[in-house]
Image (tube, grey):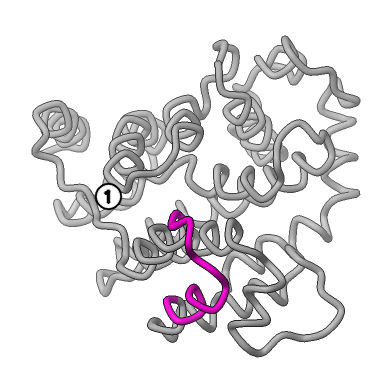
Amino acid sequence: MNLITILLQIEKEFVSGQFTIPALPAIAMKVKEAVQDPEMDMEKLAKVVSLDPPFTAFLINIANSPLFRGVATINSIPNALGRIGLESTRNSAMIFAVRSLLRTRDPLCKRLLTIAWNQSRKVAAFSYVIAQHLKTVDPDRALVAGLFHNIGMIPMLVKLAQQKQPEQEIMSQWTQVAKIARNVGVRVLAHWGLEEDLKAVAKGSNEWTQDHDEPMVDLVNLAIWHSFLGKPEFKSLPKLNELSYFRENPMLETDASESLLFVKESREELDKMMHALNG
């Protein structure tokens, strides 16, 4: 069975509701529910977080990362929660959840998921830095949105690996896989009970000139556009000032040369963000 046939089969399964949606890891669900509890306080949340040692270690690492830039090194959950707060703890749980979905013993699947994860990390880092630069959306939220923009690729790539599709063929059709994965991503995020802005980003990613009601979509697309700088795919992208972002927001950069300068000046910050996401 060739790749195009499998992609059509996946599309059919998706429409009929037969496509398998990965479950949100238990600790991410517990943290999500805890943060939504109006009676939740840091002491109670610390008990929830401590139920999962790997997430505990990840959260402490996040608290000590460039995301929060604390002066003193943190080595306990109460101190970590005190530094990053409830909302960022929930965001960190979502980041941890995505990382958890990447675990596999299948070599092909691992290589494919690593490619998708690295793309997500790069777009997330750009989303955070650009949000800080433009001050149009919350940078922490932009980070999560950027990380989740291609979440549908995870179940898609797992399924393709299970079908024993040649890696070269999958890579050659990556754009087509990513296009179908957008709808899958929306369903994944809805299944997890996540917010409309994240679902809008999953649906609208790489829709460069289309109008979007959710401002986060335009910002993440701006991040995706910047992430392609220097790559062969960049030649097929629209000019920067043609992106839908510019219909609502002015921006200092108006061409690729100024964007390259922005990327160069932000390189250290981008690298630190990508490292923090890798834990």
**Residue closest to the eye, 64 or 83:** 83
Q: Is residue 182 left or right of residue 65?
A: left
**For residue 82: magenta?**
no
Q: Residue at x 55, y 12 (%)?
A: 210
Picture coordinates of residue 12, whole percent (x, y)? 12, 27
Residue plotted at (71% across, 85% down): 74
- For the N terminus, which image quadrant? top left
Q: Which residue is mark 1?
A: 155
Q: Residue 278 occupies which quadrant of the picture?
A: bottom right
The local secondary structure at tag 1 comes to helix
Q: Is residue 48 above or below residue 231?
A: below
Seen in the picture, residue 7 relative to 77 is either above or below; the reply is above
46 within the magenta span: yes
Relative horizontal placement of residue 251, taking residue 171 as reference (left or right): right
Q: Residue lying furthest bottom in this view? A: 75
Q: Which kind of residue does numbered mark 1 sit on?
A: Pro
Q: Please provide the residue range marked out in magenta.
A: 36-48
Q: As drawn, which residue projects farthest toward the front?
A: 39
SS assignment for the magenta stretch, majority: helix
Residue 28 place in picture, x, y as percent: 39, 64
- Residue closest to the eye, 87 or 177: 87
**Badge 1 density bin: few <14, some 14–19, many ≥20, Cα 10 Å:** many
Residue in view at x 81 percent, y 58 percent: 269
Q: Position of residue 274 (x, y in %)?
A: 66, 61
